[in-house]
Image (spheres, rainbow, N blue to C red):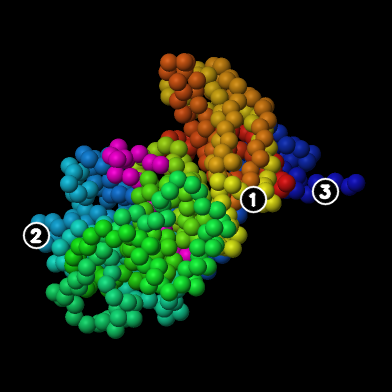
Amino acid sequence: MEIDHSESAEIIEKYEPIAEVKNERQMSIEGFARYMFSKECLLFKEKCQTVYQDMNHPLNDYFISSSHNTYLLSDQILGPSDIWGYISALVKGCRSLEIDCWDGAQNEPIVYHGYTFTSKLLFKTVVQAINKYAFVTSDYPVVLSLENHCSPGQQEVMANILQSTLGDFLLSDMLDEFPDSLPSPEALKFKILVKNKKVGTLSKTRERMGTDKRGKVLEWEEEVYEDGDEDSGNEQETWDSFLLRVQAEKEADPSTLSGIAYAKKKTRKLRIAMALSDLVIYTKAEKLRSFQYSRIYQQFNEINSIGESRARKLSKLRVHEFIFHTATFITRVYPKLMRADSSNFNPQEFWNVGCQMVALNFQTPGVPMDLQNGKFLDNGGSGYVLKPDILRDTTLGFNPIEPEKDGHPITLTIRLISGIQLPVSLPSNTPDISVIIEIYGVPNDRGKQQTRVVKNNAFSPKWNETFTFLIQEPELALIRFAVETQQGFLSGSELLGQYTLPVLCMNKGYRRVPLLSKSGANLEPSSLFIYVWYFRE
């Protein structure tokens, strides 16, 4: 069998600095080092560094990089508010920002965490920063999630600020091609969408375009609901029983279903400035009454927001119904109120059921943000990642808790060979080093393996250890490499660096893993040298 050496010759020609060695079609240590530290040897696939996915699906078919309380730089009680929160999130590719709006002095709306001691920003300053940085990293649409506590008068001021500052970036009318369905990210390139309460239809909004809306206030009575019947009980519903319920709903008179779809608790009167209401097009904020109610009544442009505790319960007890819902409607999950320290939950559990906007506190480093940053490395860091078929096709009956045996699992083998100039906290330190490899995905795919400890060598530790993982749902799986120092039984371990990425974005073969700090900063030249192989079962 004849071996093709053309690729090797190209590598030598490109990276070998010594002419005599190059002429001999060989490679020196220096040339090999240059090759190893080149982009060609990185673990992350070059394809995944570009927007390679189909961006013409409706918005609900994508995971969307989302931030919670974007204006905060630390905790939720005393922490400072700063436009840097918005700038930093946008530079990282975040596409859904949260703005908590309150009445301010001199008719100037302000942004802060209400009823706390967090500092305050002017709404107009926030919008100016968003206008400047919205499309620095990604061309795809940005959603401004307004937590609106303003009076109608200051809501009108907000609408004027949004229009005058954002100009053509602001989506203020439905697209002609999408009068009754969600547009695609491609169709909404360089557009900023407002998520807020809305009164009336999109056609009525279009009819009012160009009219004087000053001082006009829309009033309506909003019903407040207890948790719907879908999160009662303690047993997980099967796919078959869910299909029977859906079929019964289709055959029944909707008026007979409304009474069991949700439990009305009370009503409250709300007022919204017409000028602000009319800026809400494809992202109307609507509370989740119940999944059943949504199947019957929810409109295509309505987004539900669910707290993490309720979402977690639903993901366990009504998993099929949850996935059926997220296949049709954009769903946002946000941290519970008790996270006053701005801590985060594990976003993977909500990606597993198809939630598009899993909103995290971007200012808080840790494993959840490592997973967030790793997931959205994919598709060119655009902030939009196409959901796999199992979360878009409602006929498949996917259950992340019990993946199908006839799926498409992979066997992943990682040989961890060595480390290169691993970071240490002090130059005089010679720590004991180990590496942890973790898989995050559906519950059955969660895995964690660890190397032995290499003592007193952070400069060039060697392990040469092999680890194998069986991954049932690789399309949802992330892999995290964490380098830690072992500081003793009482002191525990300290993270020196980590790198997280989607499993299917890994190159095969001998690869270099660049390490990032806890805050996400690049720690070059610190890296790991590994060998990767995976195949479909």
Dot 1 amino acid type: Glu
Q: CA distance from mark 2 to mark 3?
A: 75 Å
| Placement of 90 over or under 191, stated as above or below | above
Which residue is labeled 2 in the image?
A: 106
Q: CA distance from mark 2 to mark 1?
A: 60 Å
Name of the residue lying farthest toward the left: 106
Residue 381 location in percent, x, y?
49, 53
Q: Is residue 48 visible?
A: no
Which residue is labeled 1 in the image?
A: 404
Q: Are marks 3 and 1 in contact (CB under 8 Å)?
A: no
Dot 2 amino acid type: Gln
Image point 27% across, 72% down: which residue?
Answer: 199
Residue 379 location in percent, x, y?
54, 56
Dot 3 amino acid type: Asp
Tell me which segment is drawn in magenta. Answer: 328-345
How crowded is the residue under tag 3: few (<14 C-alpha within 10 Å), some, or many (20+)? Answer: few
* Viewer-side label of 2, 3: 2
Which residue is labeled 3 in the image?
A: 4
Residue 272 location in percent, x, y?
20, 68
| Element assignment for label 1 | loop
* Between discs 2 and 1, the one toward the N terminus: 2
Q: Who is closer to the viewer here, 394 or 21?
A: 394
Marker count (numbered): 3
| Placement of 332 over or under 463, stated as above or below | below
Residue 321 location in percent, x, y?
49, 57
Left or right: 498 in relation to 231: right
Q: Main secondary structure of the magenta part?
A: loop
* Between discs 3 and 1, the one toward the N terminus: 3
